[in-house]
Amino acid sequence: MISILFVCHGNICRSAMAEYIMKDMVKKAGREKDFHIESAATSTEEIGNPVYPPARRVLLAHGIACEGHAARQIARKDYERFDLIIGMDRWNIRNMQRVFQNDPDGKIHLMSEYGHFSGEVEDPWYTGKFDKVYEQLDDGCRGLLKMPG
């Protein structure tokens, strides 16, 4: 089983969307026993909050539910719990390395490493480009789904 933690700044847009997109793909592929999927934030700003409404609307437009989500912050113990820790941008990566005291096992990656796009997944909280973020996350999750269980 591969355990994946998606991480962004607040855990209400990008990482939460990635979590639910990946869970939906895994379920549709009949591979639920191959993956454990969660998401978290680097900040404390949104702890306990649900998926941000515009992000929720984009997920629902693609038939993906996200009820019951409550944003949480990463903790040092997450480094041991997960095989892959995937950040959306370089700022997320820097913050994760600080919390995890670097990345001795090479678990931290950018989402773009798994998709056909380059660079970072921009924060739609600021850009408003929730559809573009969905497309990038969907692409990256398709790459992750190819991993053997």
Image (tube, helix red, strand yellow):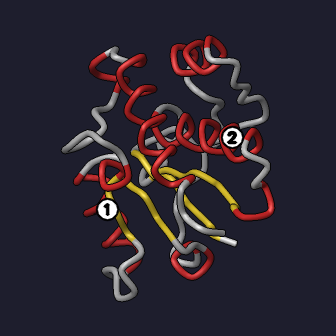
Q: Earlier in the sequence, mark 2 or mark 1?
A: 2
- Identify the residue at horizontal 62%, vertical 76% (top origin): 81
Q: Is residue 10 above or below residue 148?
A: above
Which mark is on residue 95? 1
Q: Is residue 100 above or below residue 117?
A: below
- Identify the residue at horizontal 27%, vertical 48% (top origin): 89
Q: Position of residue 139 (x, y in %)?
A: 42, 37
Left or right of 66 on screen, residue 40: left
Q: Is residue 112 above or below residue 127?
A: below
Identified by mark 1, the residue type is: Asn
Q: Quadrant of residue 38?
A: bottom right
The quadrant of the image that shows the N terminus is bottom right
Identified by mark 2, the residue type is: Ala
Q: Position of residue 79 (x, y in %)?
A: 51, 77
- Identify the residue at horizontal 35%, vertical 45% (top origin): 115
User: Which residue was labeled with disc 2?
Assistant: 70
